[in-house]
């Protein structure tokens, strides 16, 4: 092995060194990604954030640099084996590395757009139809609960009513208002 490596030109040795080292790093990064070693866990946070927290288009990241040098090395080796000059080999390997970085950055950008926070936004319950689960007292005298579909998920939420009579279990209700502290104001649907 060392005999083969020592017979290469210094230009070829550099490309084989880059390809070997960065392929090894790439394998470790890939395995880490599959087992979840690259997650940014900040704990259990239960809050509503109205902001775009997407990753954005990130071109210069560790993963992109590893991908660049991996493709740079292997495309350079392939170009040298095809008989291209050192200048052409360098040009081809830089272009291939940049194309790979662009593909990776675009891929991670679009993957980050697929996420959904799952945070319940109470304003989305407005005008939704639900069913009383626990009796709601007339004229806001007793808080009850309703089952209601909000954000494509069935939720059990606290509710009050301005009706003159109690809303009992099984009655169909419509959300007319959401208070500042997240309690639903409902009315019966007859």
Image (cartoon, rainbow, N blue to C red):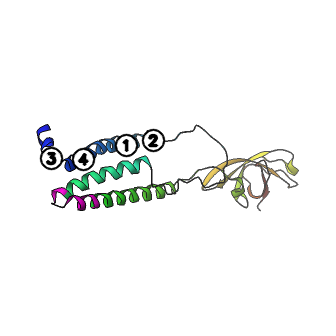
x and y, in percent, of residue 54 in the image: 55, 54
- Mark 4 / mark 1, whichever is N-terminal: 4
Cβ atoms under marks 1 and 3 closer than 8 Å: no
Q: Nearer the viewer, residue 109 or 113?
A: 109
Picture residue at 32% right of the left edge, 58% below the top: 94
- Mark 4 / mark 2, whichever is N-terminal: 4
- Mark 3 / mark 2, whichever is N-terminal: 3
Q: Which residue is mark 3?
A: 8
Between disc 4 and disc 1, the foreground one is 4
Q: Which residue is mark 1?
A: 29
Q: Which residue is mark 2?
A: 38
Q: Secondary structure at mark 1?
A: helix
Q: Which residue is mark 4?
A: 14
Between disc 1 and disc 3, the foreground one is 3
Taking the magenta stretch, the answer to whether it contains residue 8 is: no
Cβ atoms under marks 4 and 3 closer than 8 Å: no
x and y, in percent, of residue 80 in the image: 18, 56
Q: Residues within 10 Å of mark 4 (few under 14, many from 20)?
A: some
**C-alpha gap between disc 1 and disc 3:** 29 Å
**C-alpha gap between disc 4 and disc 1:** 22 Å
x and y, in percent, of residue 95 in the image: 32, 61
- Mark 1 / mark 3, whichever is N-terminal: 3
Q: Nearer the viewer, residue 138 or 127?
A: 127
Taking the magenta stretch, the answer to whether it contains residue 83 is: yes
């Amino acid at each position: 092995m060392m005999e083969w490596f020592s017979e290469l030109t210094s230009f070829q040795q550099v490309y084989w060194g880059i390809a070997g080292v960065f392929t090894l790093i790439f394998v470790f990064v890939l395995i880490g990604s599959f087992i979840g070693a690259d997650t940014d866990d900040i704990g259990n946070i239960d809050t509503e954030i109205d902001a775009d927290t997407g990753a954005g288009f990130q071109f210069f990241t560790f993963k992109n640099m590893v991908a660049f040098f991996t493709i740079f090395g292997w495309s350079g080796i392939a170009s040298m084996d095809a008989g291209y000059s050192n200048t052409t080999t360098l040009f081809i390997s830089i272009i291939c590395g940049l194309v790979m970085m662009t593909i990776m950055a675009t891929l991670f950008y679009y993957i980050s757009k697929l996420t959904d926070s799952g945070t319940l936004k109470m304003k989305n319950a407005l005008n939704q139809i639900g069913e009383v689960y626990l009796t709601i007292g007339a004229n806001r005298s007793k808080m009850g609960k309703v089952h209601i579909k909000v954000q494509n998920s069935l939720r059990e939420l606290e509710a009050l009513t301005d009706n003159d009579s109690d809303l009992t279990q099984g009655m169909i209700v419509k959300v007319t208002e959401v208070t500042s502290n997240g309690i639903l104001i409902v009315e019966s649907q007859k």
